[in-house]
Image (tube, rainbow, N blue to C red):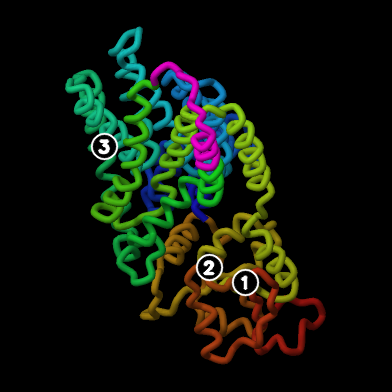
Amino acid sequence: MDEVLALTAAREPTLSEVWQAIWSGTDFSPPTYHFFLHGLINTVGAADSRLLWRLPSILAIYGAAICTYLFLVRSHLSRLSAVLGFGIVLAFKLFDHAIEVREYAMLVFGLAAAFLLWSEIEEDGPRYAKAFGLWLVLSACLCIHFYGIIEVAAIGTAEFVYAIWQKRIRTVVWVALLLTVPVQAALLPLAHHLATFNNGDNLAPAYYAKPSVHAFFTATNEVVGGAAFLLAALVVICAALLAKNRGLHPTKLQPVRIELKIVLIALCVLPFTTFAFSALVTKSFSARYMAAAALIPAIGFPWLLDWLPWRRTVASALMPLIAIVLVLRAQEPDPIARALAVAQKAAPLAPVVVGEAGLYIELMEAADPGTRADLVYLARPSGAFSPDPTNENELVRIARLNPEYRVRSQAAFLGTHKRFYVLTRLDKSIDTTTPSLLANGLLKKPVDAGHGILLYPSVASAEGPRGGGKR
């Protein structure tokens, strides 16, 4: 659903209307990314291309992979280990962000580039130019998303650890960090204004993004790679134990630069920083806000690999694993495709009421014009309770910009439509419409379309469609 928010704003005819869409609460981030998409699509002229909308994210993840490779090589790791890091960036959690029309891939690219610049401050070349480049990258992160402050905090953590480790203060880096404060200050009025739209949502008892300890550990596991991370760790641990059992010792390599160890420390702190910012400031927490923590396995595994005497053998074992993970991720089904297929079959027979606001938004983006015309969302009656009204409130805001969105009151719709279907999914998101219609005895036994998708005919649909009409 989040992709639709970005698309809705970026598709507006002019930049001023893009800004107005953001200001009206369509999306909760600065307009920089939406301006960029708007300019890209209008320049190329391929608004219907799914690839073009996602191209910035795809290139950003490749950019993050290249920066990770260069950082590992310049940290004195072997090129083989650096290639492994490159592959992990592409195949683990960041793959998901590479195919999204969202800002998170760019934030990861920004942090990877920032770490590369930060690690080179002491190397040959103009220090002030590198510090300016660092400030520019961090400022871009702030302008892309409000959670870009996490990238600034990560560099601040790294520099703080460096100052303790080396017992010296690098003024040029701290000045670059301090100069991001005016950028943050310039964005505060927009942040405060947008916060007014969801201040009530994040207080709801079932708010989807409520910060909690369980959410933190679940998100951390998801971001670092989940099962793929555990499998890769198992390969490395088994190889290390086998080498130790046989009395093998690693080949002496050039000492790893301390910057690599410091970056790993900063990345390990990043999830805690994100959670603290979410719990204390925004009151909203999600794994995507700390997407850059996915760089932990991309840097950590290559570093561990260089300690092993069988590094070539272990790398050769991990490469196919990464390739398999990448292929499997590419084959994952479209999560909305099954629900869309059910809606397309039902729409020619009668209007399809979509129970979930989030599902309605996704279907309106994925469906053809004919199907969209028969999709309806019924707003909650005044005073009715919803454990999490976030998606419905967002839907109402989008409907003000898109006349194709049909948001109707339950009373008005039921007064003019006796025959209809209700589409819902089990345990996906909040649906107050379906329970309300069931309680009023307006729906028959559902048709189970599989994968948790249910299609309820209305009681008046018992005789089936007559004469091919929809109403």
Residue contact at pointers 2 and 3, CB within 8 angstroms: no
Name the mark nearer the viewer: 1 or 3: 1
Residue 215 position, x and y percent, is 39, 59
Disc 1 marks a residue whose amino acid type is: Gly
Q: Residues within 10 Å of mark 2 (few under 14, many from 20)?
A: few
With 378 as the anchor, is 366 left or right in this view? right
Question: With respect to residue 462, does 399 lie above or below?
Answer: above
Dot placed on the residue nearer the N-terminal end, 1 or 3: 3
Dot placed on the residue nearer the N-terminal end, 2 or 3: 3
Circle 2 residue: 428
Query: At 25% from the left edge and 44% from the top edge, which residue is drawn?
Result: 189
Query: At 80% from the left edge and 77% from the top edge, which residue is drawn?
Result: 468
Circle 1 residue: 452
Residue 348 position, x and y percent, is 74, 70
Mark number, residue 184: 3
Give the magenta part as a residue range.
Answer: 236-255
Could you say which is closer to the camera, residue 30 or residue 427? 427
